[in-house]
Image (cartoon, coloured by chain):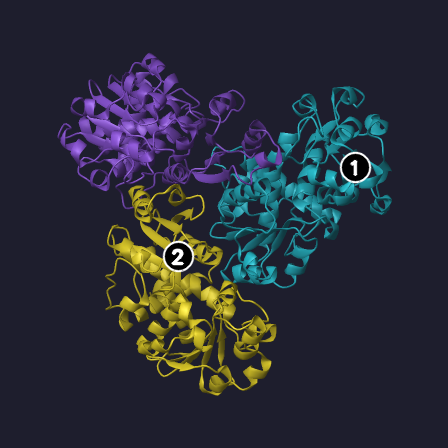
Chain colours: A cyan, B yellow, C purple
Amino acid sequence: MTKKASSSSKETDRKSAGPKFVWTRKDLVGLDELSADEIVHILDTAQTFQEVSTRSIKKVPALRGKVVALLFFEDSTRTRMSFELAASRLSADTVFLSGKGSSTSKGETTLDTVRNVEAMGVDAFVIRHSQSGAPHQLTEKVKVPIINAGDGQHEHPTQGLLDIFTIRQRLGSLEGVKVAIVGDIAHSRVARSNIIGLRKLGAEVVVVGPPTLVPSTITAMGCEISHSLDDILDEVDVINMLRIQFERFESNLFPSLREYSSLFGMNAKRLAKCNKNVLIMHPGPINRGVELTSEVADGPNSCILQQVTNGLAVRMAVLYLVSRGRD
Amino acid sequence: MTKKASSSSKETDRKSAGPKFVWTRKDLVGLDELSADEIVHILDTAQTFQEVSTRSIKKVPALRGKVVALLFFEDSTRTRMSFELAASRLSADTVFLSGKGSSTSKGETTLDTVRNVEAMGVDAFVIRHSQSGAPHQLTEKVKVPIINAGDGQHEHPTQGLLDIFTIRQRLGSLEGVKVAIVGDIAHSRVARSNIIGLRKLGAEVVVVGPPTLVPSTITAMGCEISHSLDDILDEVDVINMLRIQFERFESNLFPSLREYSSLFGMNAKRLAKCNKNVLIMHPGPINRGVELTSEVADGPNSCILQQVTNGLAVRMAVLYLVSRGRD
Amino acid sequence: MTKKASSSSKETDRKSAGPKFVWTRKDLVGLDELSADEIVHILDTAQTFQEVSTRSIKKVPALRGKVVALLFFEDSTRTRMSFELAASRLSADTVFLSGKGSSTSKGETTLDTVRNVEAMGVDAFVIRHSQSGAPHQLTEKVKVPIINAGDGQHEHPTQGLLDIFTIRQRLGSLEGVKVAIVGDIAHSRVARSNIIGLRKLGAEVVVVGPPTLVPSTITAMGCEISHSLDDILDEVDVINMLRIQFERFESNLFPSLREYSSLFGMNAKRLAKCNKNVLIMHPGPINRGVELTSEVADGPNSCILQQVTNGLAVRMAVLYLVSRGRD
């Protein structure tokens, strides 16, 4: 969908960005299964949808009459809203099921719940689940496309894609870009999806955190390890600060909050040691004064709110690609 | 709406199936109040809507600009989603109120809550309530149509209708069909709506369960009683397994879960003793290994997911009939 | 929008009632900031939308493609539904975030939550917050219009407007009308918005309640004080009964429930002493037998349900005015 094409007709709105590339996947479970071409195709499609978001009427009829079922077995206000708005901009209807109060709490299996909603005639699933691998297992059992909105400590592909989209938008390309990912690497699906996607598109990745949270085996994913944030500040183009999960502090994997913040938090002093145009990212919600100070979060290097805006375009692209494939 | 007619125009979409029959009821509180003709008219209307669900764009403009208020004083994810999607396919908007956090919890009466929502200008109510008879009492006090989505131990008419619709779809007719309903008959609104509707359309019903859960007075509804599932296996065309409410076990009305399952659960061994084409039904959510084994639930005789699909068509029909009556 | 104009075209639907008045405000935080002309303009606009609610298809395309985000940091079923339906009648989409389970509960600041939702590209905010002044602070930090749906003990402007709209509808004008507001004046945002708006439009206000709940400083807002309901019954045209917040009884600010009801509750005996056409109002949900008896609540002087109906028209007007201003 080029800018020229998008203003012509409904039919044109449904054409994809890459004229030669044909999307064939039913599901999006993780970036691990995607080729570099597929990732780029999603980013390109998202870019065309970005334009829709600047219109006064932010809707295209691409998925009119379709129903997207949002099954959040694990709660998430922010990701739910982003997918809900993305579906709405494509003119799809949504239906929502949360973990609390769902049939799952009545002893029904996840598969039975999903099959039941499928039997109601929905056209796509967006599934968040606390169990790693749950969306993947479901893809083999249901005919309707499944988009993984985060599963356990496995992947959060649309978060990875929106982060990569944002870097490409700001730096022009991923090739040769060096990205630091800082925090609890061991338990983070956001880190995993970022590392996998960034590496496939030619970026370098260094993961940063205390040894308890950065397993040495992570180098198998093609990234470097640093236990000192200060050491890598002047080497990187992007610093992606992971959200601190406070519950981890109780598990003795984390130093104290104060110590963590002093060693791995971004502040003005550290920012001064960085590349002048370094991008500061965070998947949100942010803990001001912990992962980063307000000065950094609200400063000119931060693209945290742009990430949120881009999330909609990326989710529109993914919903569109997997749903269109079924026609 | 014949298949021929449905492809012509919007106006044609709004015509009802039976060319002579005119629906006159404001509400649907239970099958008890309906004539056999009225039940058949709902089933026929549902059949025409079934076709809508096979389209790529699953919407008809029948209730465009109307608002359906879903008032679930008692929670239910599944029935809520089914009504929500049914309304959406008719192009109606929905507004949802759950028991938790509603004004009821602030000391407001149910009637005041309903009258307030009525004053907001909604066009139909779908009401679930833990108190038997609540929807009926409300029908006399509000002008807007009320559809009962389950009230206490009284009726669950759309569940009864979708079960009957499924049997008619699979067996062609209800006349002379013999249906077993298995489980906690005494406390089940699903059982009651099924028995009433099935009897009106000429089917025979045998209710099956331990004496504590099958009151002898139920024969007044025109059904037989059996305390042995094995005894009736080869006599019936349909076996409808009710969901076990685990909380009843604590009340001493139920034998142990294991004993219940061994006496009244469907499994491959029992299925082998049935009519080869016997239909296995369940209102869901199922407890695998309790009411039925996975082998039976997922086997060729099971029409459990078809029931879910049919639920949408039946609820579209009911929403359409009661809302159209007001124009 | 005159009745004549409203039946012509979509474009005409978007014209405002007062041909000369131009609405310029981005936000609606309280009636305190509005001029009398602005209040009247909202009432006039609401009156034109009242007509929409009598149509069979209760929708106008005024806000098609726009998204209204309902951020209820403090829960409210009734106000949420009213705004949701108002947005829907203007053809806007809505997205909902409740206090429970929101990112706020993960330690995110209210401002960060609001900025995040803004970054998702929404077109208007409806915000309820337990903290007085929260919506006002947010208006300076976000570009998207903010409508205050109730903040702490500060204001509830759309409730004030719908009450004033109802009085004008029934009595023709506010000029010289005398309104009693009865109950916990000290802690009520409903009382504050009413007093401010009524005074600006030329009505007289007497606030009624026990000394613990009616601060003497309230006279600075231009209203009289009475500690006896009986004393003012024959002087007033309108009696607006505030809802009792039961939790206040524990704070020793209230007499016993029984004493409160006998001193400040409306009943048939008191109604007999009033002006024959006195209007009895209540913001709901009502506690029958406490603020008023059923005889009064359901009697000919009550306009409680009309208030609810009018609430939709007023909220449509406010959503329309603040959203249109951005085009």
Q: Position of residue A314 (x, y in %)?
A: 62, 42
Q: Position of residue C311 (x, y in %)?
A: 32, 34
Q: Nearer the viewer, residue B177 or C7?
A: B177
Q: Quadrant of the N terminus of chain B?
A: bottom left
- Count of numbered badges drawn on the protein: 2
Residue B277 shows in the view: no
The image quarter in which residue A278 lies:
top right
Chain letter of the residue beneath label 1 in the structure image:
A
Q: Residues within 10 Å of mark 1 (few under 14, many from 20)?
A: some
Q: Say whether residue A102 is left or right of residue B2.
A: right
Same chain, marks 2 and 1? Answer: no
Residue behind mark 1 = A175
Q: Nearer the viewer, residue A190 or B103?
A: B103
The three-letter amino acid code for the residue at tag 2 is: Ser
The three-letter amino acid code for the residue at tag 1 is: Glu
Residue B105 in the image: above or below residue B252: above
Q: Residue furthest top?
A: C220
Chain letter of the residue beneath label 2 in the structure image:
B
Q: Which mark is residue B130?
A: 2
Q: Position of residue A305 (x, y in %)?
A: 62, 30
Q: Position of residue B31 (x, y in %)?
A: 32, 67
Q: Residue at x 56, y 60 (%)?
A: A113
Q: Say whether residue B102 is left or right of residue B143.
A: right
Q: Residue at x 36, y 22 (%)?
A: C212
Foreground mark, 2 or 1, reads 2
